[in-house]
Every structure is written in structure tokens, then in C-alpha cells.
Amino acid sequence: MCRLLIYKGTDVIELSHLLTRPCHSIINQAFDSRLRLDRRRPINGDGFGVGWYDAQELDQPEEPSSTQGEPCIFNSVTPAWNNANLTRLAVKIKSPLVFAHVRATTAGSLSLDNCHPWSYGKLMWMHNGSISDFHLIKRKLQASLSDELFAVPQGNTDSEWAFALFLSFLPNPKAKSFTPNVLKKAMLSCIAQLNQWAKEAKITEPSLMNFCITDGKSVVATRYVSSRTDEAASLWFSSGTTFHEYAPGGHYRMTKSDKRENIFLIASEPLTFEKADWMEIPSNTIIVITPKMNILQIPIIDEFHVPASVANKRLGDFAATKGLLSRGQVTNEHDDTPPNEPTSGL
């Protein structure tokens, strides 16, 4: 199915270090996945998108009517690995907060409007997964929206309608700033409402809801499945001081030179082959990254929550059939390189 990537750092990063230069970048994963076998969609060639914030705009005082601080998004329906404009832009753009997404169509047609991420004011959203039998709850979702939010989706994907629903749970979707807690509460309310409608429609197939939202300063992401027995779509986490190329050929790693965490990466599939760089986020978890680079990992307590002691008994078959679960582990393919020091836990 799809893949996503989040970068948040105290310093800006050139987009090429995330998108094009690493040998296992999100763009290369689109046609050369090491951790997923999806026989129905062996490549992610149905479009891509990358969104970023301008570091200077985020730090400057804002005019009341200005679009300052809003994300810039570039997307295309062409395969990401064959887009010359993306390659040119990636070496010229630097940002402290980046969302990237490559798409394999499961819901919605192949069109520019259906490419993630999407934005509304200061906010940017993307999704990896699917809302099962979405057509059975779509009209309820639409009826719940204000006229203004009903007009937000320009495409026809379940993901973009879920974004409109998320916006409806914010006190003011057009606010100039949002606290991490406000974003977290809206995210949990969005998931709970989708689950409630699915129950009312007697939908039995689980939904895979790896949702991501940011306002340019905070990030909230979920790894979630509406099931007590199944694994959610894959989601991995890495943190450190620097993310750099340590060997020619696009071989990158995350390093920690001290206790500071200057960089956070969240990805559907790891960007490096260094096992110590990455840890898997547990299913049915919400991740919150604050503007001050603190990170919280919080279990989502609802009817599909299971205690940590039995969480490892979740089955991966459902997500794997959707092409959304890594069946392998991250391995260091280069035995001649020194092992990296383990990163700290969440």
C-alpha cells in the first residue's frame, strides 16, 4: 500500500537526505521494499507528495491575515523515482519538519487531488492504511461536517475525508497555533468516531489508521488497528543527534553523540539498514512530539486496547495481506561497518 515518513529536527535538513540520497530512502522503498511483500501492488507508483515548513517563517512574528507558517506541498501522480522536479527540489529545500508519502492506490482514483499530504491552514495530514468499507460510513461522516469543512476534501479518498473529520474536532481549525494536547485529543476523537460509525454499520473488517498531523511545531502520529487480535500497519521510530551518510552509495545511519535528541524520524519502513537505529512503535499507540523536542508514547485505551503483556500475541496476517506490515527485521547489510550505539527508547 502506501508509505510515509516524518522528519522533525532542531535544525533543518536538506530534503535529498530523506528522499533521494539514502539507498533505502522512502523514494527507493517505493520500488525496492526490503520489509514488505505485496503481491497485488509490488511498487508504490501511484503518486507521491512531500510537504515542509519554512524555518524562518515558523520563527518570525506573524501578521493576522498572513499565510506565513503554512506548509508548502509538492505532489505528483508520476512515480516518485522518475520525477526530475522532485530531484531538483530536494537539493534546494531545507526544513525542520517534513512529511513525505508515496502512494499505492487502494481507495480513490489516480489523481493529484488524492496524493498525500493535505493541508488546511497551518495543519498538514497524511495516512497509511485504509478505513474498511468506507462507503458504508461516508455519508455519516459528511453529514457531521460543517459546510466549510465539507468543502475541504478535493479528492475522493477515505484518508482525506478522515482529515476533514479530524478538523471538526478542533476548537478552531484555522487557529494560528495548536498545543500538542489539542492535536492529540482531536486525533483520538477522530479515531473513536470512525470506530463508532463502523460498529453502527456492522463493519467487521478492521481499519488500519496510521494517521499523522502537524502544525509545523508539534507532531502527532498513530499506529492503530481497530482489532484486539491483529497488528497495525508498520511504523518505526528513530532518534539521535545526526542523520548522516557514513559510507558512499547512500548508506546512512542515525548517531547519538550525547543525550540530546535533535532529530526524530517516524517511518513506515526504516530508512537505514542499521538495526540499532530503529525501534518498532507498538500497535494502538499515539506518538506526540512537542515543540521542545520531547516525545511521548501513549497507549490508545479503547475497546481494541490489549495489555502490553499480551500485545505481542497480535497476529500480522491481516496487515500483511494489505502489504502494510514488515515481516522482517532491520539488518545491517554491511558487515565491515562498525555497529551503531543503540538509541534510547521512547
Image: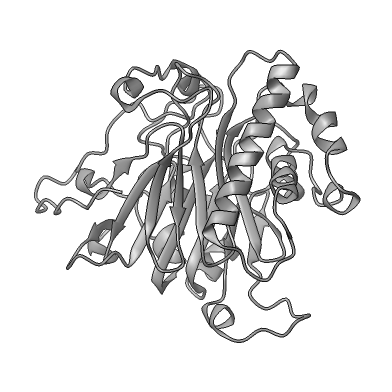
Instruction: Tell me how the rendering is colored.
Output: one colour
- In the rendering, at what x and y percent does residue 40 appear? 56, 23
- Image quadrant in which the N terminus is located: top right
The answer to whether residue 294 is left or right of residue 183 is left
| Residue at 52% from the left image edge and 67% from the top image edge | 217
Residue 28's place in the image compared with 249, above or below, is above
- In the rendering, at what x and y percent does residue 66 appear? 74, 80
Q: Nearer the viewer, residue 206 or 50?
A: 206
Q: Quadrant of residue 18?
A: bottom left
Q: How many marks?
A: 0
Viewer can see residue 4: yes
Q: Residue furthest right?
A: 147
Q: Nearer the viewer, residue 80 or 345?
A: 345
The answer to whether residue 262 is left or right of residue 80 is left
| Residue at 46% from the left image edge and 67% from the top image edge | 291
Residue 324's place in the image compared with 20, above or below, is above
- In the rendering, at what x and y percent does residue 229 appear? 44, 16
The answer to whether residue 156 is left or right of residue 28 is right
Viewer can see residue 20: no
| Residue at 60% from the left image edge and 65% from the top image edge | 85
Q: Nearer the viewer, residue 314 or 48?
A: 314
- In the rendering, at what x and y percent does residue 304 appear? 51, 23
Q: Quadrant of residue 255?
A: bottom left
Residue 186's place in the image compared with 64, above or below, is above
